[in-house]
Amino acid sequence: MFRILAFLLVVLILGLGFAWVADNPGDVTIAWLGREVETSFLTFLIAALLVVGAAILLFWLVSSLFSAPERIGGYFSARRRDKGYRALSGGILAAGAGDAATARRMLRKSERALDGRKEPLLRFLDAQTAMIEGDHGRARRLFEAMEKDEDTRLLALRGLFLEAERVNDPVAARHYAERAVRIAPHVPWAGGAVLELKAAEGDYDAALDILKAQRSSHLVDRQESNRLRAVLLTAKAQTQAETDPANARTAAREAQKLAPDLTPAALVAAKASIRLGDTRRASRILEKAWSEAPHPEVAELYVHAKPGLPAAERLQRAQRLLSLQPQSAESHLAVAHAALEARDLVLARREAEAAAAGDPRESVFLLLADIEDADTGDQGRVRAWMARALSAPRDPAWMAEGVVSPQWSPVSPVSGRLDAFKWSAPAERPAPARSIGGERAEPPAPPAVAAEPDPAPEEERPALTLSAGEAEPASSSSATEAVGEEERRQARFA
């Protein structure tokens, strides 16, 4: 729109100018070499414009004639360059698809058309093709050469980092990642790699600084940043728990605020408070953690937070946890353990059976076996509970990428990933079986616990309660065999 208005304005000005000249005629006389030429001013003006236009046209023709060879050469160079870039683009696409043969062929075409010293993508395609072909030595040499060029340094560091990870060289991988972070702190792969490497090395202060820089650069959102910071603070507090409990408690309390469901943070904060003699604060910390996520380690520490506490008072503390989470099986288990220690076997059995009704698993049935042994001493019933423990689901544990650990850790032992450990149940144990004479041997049946001649169907039997007289009496030889079988079961279970 603006161009149209400008054009109309120019036309209007020219029209007004010619109209003014026509309304104000005049004569122009030119005396040159003894001759005089007289004409009107309008004619002189038109002639002058024509002469200027002819001069401009002549100058353009002469300059075009002299620049023609260069222009012709530039045309063919542009065609060759376009062919080279088309081949280069096709090679990169082929490399991305894993077609090494096509990528190598396109690389040769592009090398004939393009200058390798001026086009860094040629070296990149060469390195990528070498990696696909399995020639990692050549790829590494190409990346090292690219690292010397400022334009391709970051790309080369990325390639060298991947090569170091491929050969499982964490020292070299950290070196390249740290160099990449110094060049471009905003690059996610470098920042994330250095963050995990620092955490794996135990340098949690440096990891926290990197996480802060990533948060400032908006590489991680607020929720993820808070979670990772809580994990790093918890790990840092674990290392300081023995030497500096005050700072350990401060770091763990901050972690608990950032991630209330992070049980290890609460445990470290409570242990540090107990070490400082502040059991009341430790109890509050554990109660808050229990309200968020009941955990057996929290219950164990809470019940035994005060050394030398009588069993009856420990039972009261366990019942306090039950009041905070009355629907949780962990609450019933905590009360059952405490009641067993206090020799309140009726309460222990009731709470253990409530836990088994809500979450039947190994530890619940083993606890019922302990209660049975302490209450009645009936070995048949004890073995029945232990048999159920052998076939029950396994207890939850700290797991990371299929690895079960007795304690929480900030990084995975498999991949080094941060915040990989989760509290979950491991995979079920496979049923034991042996091959005897080429046939599959079934696992031995559990010891008999029913003595009635006509027992009820399996679905009609009580789920948990074992009434008196259910243990089948056995002869001395059968008892010996049952004891041996039970020992073998316990050995497999252990």
Image: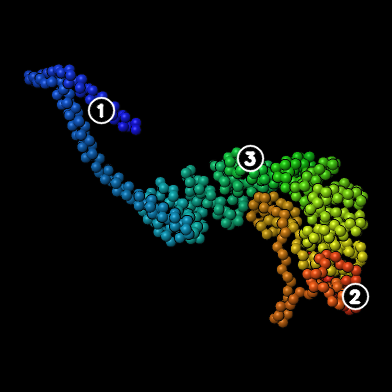
**Apparent side of residue 86 relative to residue 17 in the rendered image (left or right):** right
Give the CA separation, mark 3 to mark 2. 69 Å
Question: Nearer the N terminus, badge 1 or badge 2?
Answer: 1
Report the mark closest to the observer, 3 or 1: 1
Give the CA separation, mark 1 to mark 2. 122 Å
Element carrying mark 2: loop
The answer to whether residue 275 of the structure is visible from this angle is no
Circles 1 and 2, Cβ within 8 Å, touching? The answer is no
Question: What residue did someone put label 1 on?
Answer: 11
Q: Identify the residue at image location x=19%, y=34%.
A: 58
Task: For the N terminus, give its image quadrant.
Answer: top left
Rate crowding at label 3 as few (under 14), some (14 to 19) or many (20 or more) other CA atoms within 10 Å.
Answer: some
Pinpoint residue 85: horizontal percent, then vertical percent: 38, 50
Pinpoint residue 315: horizontal percent, then vertical percent: 88, 51
**Apparent side of residue 142 relative to residue 471 in the rendered image (left or right):** left
| Disc 1 residue type (three-letter) | Val
Question: What residue did someone put label 3 on?
Answer: 212
| Disc 3 residue type (three-letter) | Lys
In depth, the one of 208 and 53 nearer the eye is 53
Pinpoint residue 143: horizontal percent, then vertical percent: 50, 51
Query: For the view shown, which residue lies furthest in the left direction?
Result: 34
The relative height of residue 133 versus residue 278 in the rendered view (above or below) is: below
Task: For the C terminus, give its image quadrant.
Answer: bottom right
Question: Nearer the N terminus, badge 3 or badge 1?
Answer: 1
Question: Which numbered disc covers residue 170?
Answer: none
In depth, the one of 455 and 195 nearer the eye is 455
| Disc 2 residue type (three-letter) | Pro
